[in-house]
Amino acid sequence: MTRRHHAHPTQRGAALLAAMLTVALVATLAAGALWQQWRSTEIEGAERQRAQARWLLAGALDWARVILREDARADTANTATDHLAEPWAVPLQEARLSSFLSALPDGSSNSDDDQLAQQVFLSGQINDLQARLNVTNLLESDRISPSALASFARLFEALNLPPEQLRLLAQGLENAQRKTNPAQSPVMPQRVSQLSWLGVSSDTLNRLTPHITVLPVRTPVNVNTASAEVLYASVSGLSLADAQRLVALRSRTHWSSLADFQKAAGGAAMPDSDSTRSVNTRFFEVWGRLRMANTLVQERSVVQRDQTEVKVLWRESGMWAGQQTPSLQ
């Protein structure tokens, strides 16, 4: 008789388990490979978007330089003024990139470029940095300038900031300038945000930022663009109410000379020879912002204008993912 051999149930269960483990392993490896491919594609796309955004923002910066250069050409040597009614002072509200692009020379357009341009939004603005108090003015050789310190004290008073913070700022700048002990002396700040190196608190910096700047040289305040707080701080003897009155008066017509400003301010203003104020500007801040589907790239540049020459002193940029867009200051 022929014997029939039947597989033991334990053997059949082990084979089934091995098969299931093999299938699970293959599925895991396939999913991992697919995820790696997707991740590589996403990284490549993000890098490509960032590179495109940087190029577009570089073009926007060149556009701003052209505006400032044409503004300088429009002024004559005797009437060189910068004020808030000029084209450079008008912010560029967010608009589709396609509205800035023209058709190709043959009258046609690239459909792929048009589709991309419809998904990209550009905005920006130019700010007068001499509308603010310059931290560099606090330094006179290797000492603190008493007149500049008095102006900053008035600004701190107008903003209700603690005087101790100003003392920290002045002492830190003096130590950084003298470098009596290089190992312990702070590094000289080049940005407003870097004033925290000198011990200035973040809350104080947040409230000071719209009213101060850090420039490579000492600069006067442009009375045609300064805020009421900065006018109050820079003009000894001027009350905050008078500064607000001057800003309201300036909105109707700008001052073409310091003599006109002195006449409007009354006895509080200094003579025309005062080097702490002016009616024109050399240093500007250029903001550019490019928004795409899932990415926002923002760039800030500081430019120096000497007559019709406009050069970039420095640029910095940042990227944020998601739909939240920071306000442009």
Image (cartoon, grey):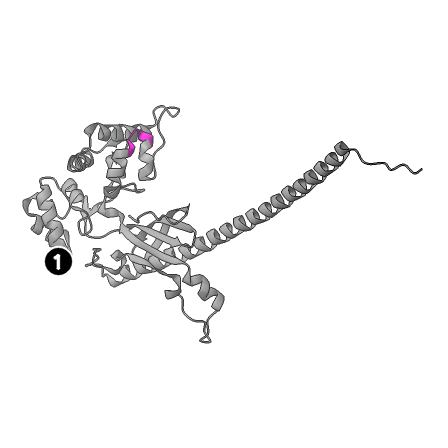
Q: Is residue 163 left or right of residue 205?
A: left
Decide if residue 186 is in sight here. yes
Judging from the image, what secondary structure is the residue with disc 1 in?
Answer: loop
In depth, the one of 272 and 310 nearer the eye is 310
Decide: is 241 above or below 88.
Answer: above
In depth, the one of 32 and 292 nearer the eye is 32
For disc 1, the neighbor class at 10 Å (few under 14, some 14 to 19, many from 20) is few
Decide: is 114 above or below 121.
Answer: below
In depth, the one of 195 and 236 nearer the eye is 195
Decide: is 48 above or below 104.
Answer: above
Quadrant occupied by the N terminus = top right
Name of the residue lying farthest toward the left = 267
**What type is the residue that disc 1 sits on?**
Arg
**Stretch in magenta:** 197-202
Q: Is residue 12 left or right of residue 126?
A: right
- Residue 150 position, x and y percent, is 17, 34
Q: Which residue is mark 1?
A: 252
- Residue 51 position, x and y percent, is 48, 53
Res 241 → quadrant: top left
Q: Is residue 183 magenta?
A: no
Decide: is 155 above or below 257.
Answer: above
Name of the residue lying farthest toward the bottom = 106
